[in-house]
Image: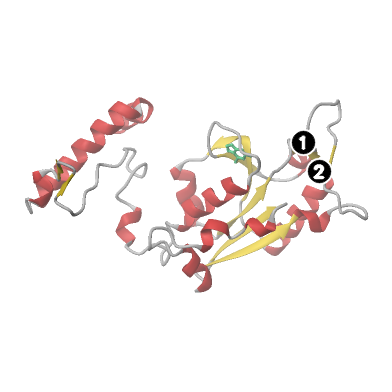
Amino acid sequence: MSWQACVITLLPEAFPGILGHSLAGRALAGRALDEGVWSLDIIALRDFGAGKHQSVDDTPSGGGAGMVLRADIAAAAYDKAVAAHPGLPVLAMTPRGKPLTQQRVQALADGPGVIVFCSRFEGVDERFYDTRMVEEVSIGDYVLSGGEVAAQVVLDAALRLRPGVMGDARSGEDESFSAGLLEYPHYTRPAEFEGHNIPDILTSGDHAKVDAWRQEMSEQITRERRPDLWEIYKKKT
Ligand code: 6GU
């Protein structure tokens, strides 16, 4: 069975977006979509809108700026998604959610797929969260205008871990975050660029030395740039 993505959104035309294009000549999430490696079901919130204008939002109770997505509309779209894709975890993309981690992404990739609810406006009526099972997820401490970009982040991160989506299967493993360290520097031809040479070890042909150098560089970069990750890594090893 192919990996199922279902997205609930006010902007259905924003999908598959970047996921339909190949990244850097490989990636293939777009090709993989065509080949049935994964599927994408887009549920338009507007289809559940109320009244002649199919309105989905209203002014916030208690006053204030912006608009709030109605709970009844959000719930109707959610119920349709869950009925069509029973058993899939449901994420709601919101800056107040739990920060997304590579570990969570890996678990999603290992499962049958995901339903992603994209919030827009100032937010969703809280009673939607009171009455439906959703995992609120954030992709970082900054605010986006809506969850669509964040949803594509989640799907991209999960899909690249699926077999048949990335060119070289190994490139999914040996990299930032899966080991808890940031990536080591990469080089390719030409041998010299604006007076900068490729480190000799990398062209020595000594694979053990190359591995040791890469490990050392990963540790150094992590220590310098991400002391938070470095502390966790040190405790683990
Ligand atoms: Cl998941 N959604 C929105 N709207 N803003 C965000 C976010 C998500 N994660 C960080 N900022």
Point out residue 3 in the picture as x, y percentages from the top left corner.
53, 64
Does residue 71 appear in the picture of this structure? yes
Give the left or right position of residue 19, taking residue 11 as reference: left
**From the viewer's perspective, is 66 left or right of 169?**
right
- Residue positioned most to the front: 194
In the image, is 123 to the left or to the right of 143?
Answer: right
Query: Which residue is painted at 30% across and 42% down in the image?
Result: 183
Residue 100: give its label: none
Query: Do the numbered discs 2 and 1 sit on residues whose CB atoms are within 8 Å?
Result: yes
Q: Nearer the viewer, residue 236 or 55?
A: 55
Distance from the alpha carbon under mark 2 to that under mark 1:
7 Å
Q: Is residue 232 left or right of residue 162?
A: left
Task: Identify which residue is drawn at 21% across, 40% down.
Answer: 215
Residue 34, image x, y percentages: 52, 72
Ligand 1 near label 1 (Cβ, under 8 Å)?
Answer: no
Q: Looking at this rendering, what residue extends furthest in the bottom direction? A: 35
Task: Decide which of 32, 196 is in the foreground and name it.
Answer: 196
The residue lying toward the viewer, choosing from 50 and 83, is 50
Residue 225, x across and y down, in percent: 33, 29
Identify the image quadrant of the C terminus.
top left
Residue at coordinates 6% horizontally, 50% vertically from top-left? 204
The residue beneath circle 1 is 126
Mark 2 = which residue? 71
What scheme was used to colour the molecule? secondary structure
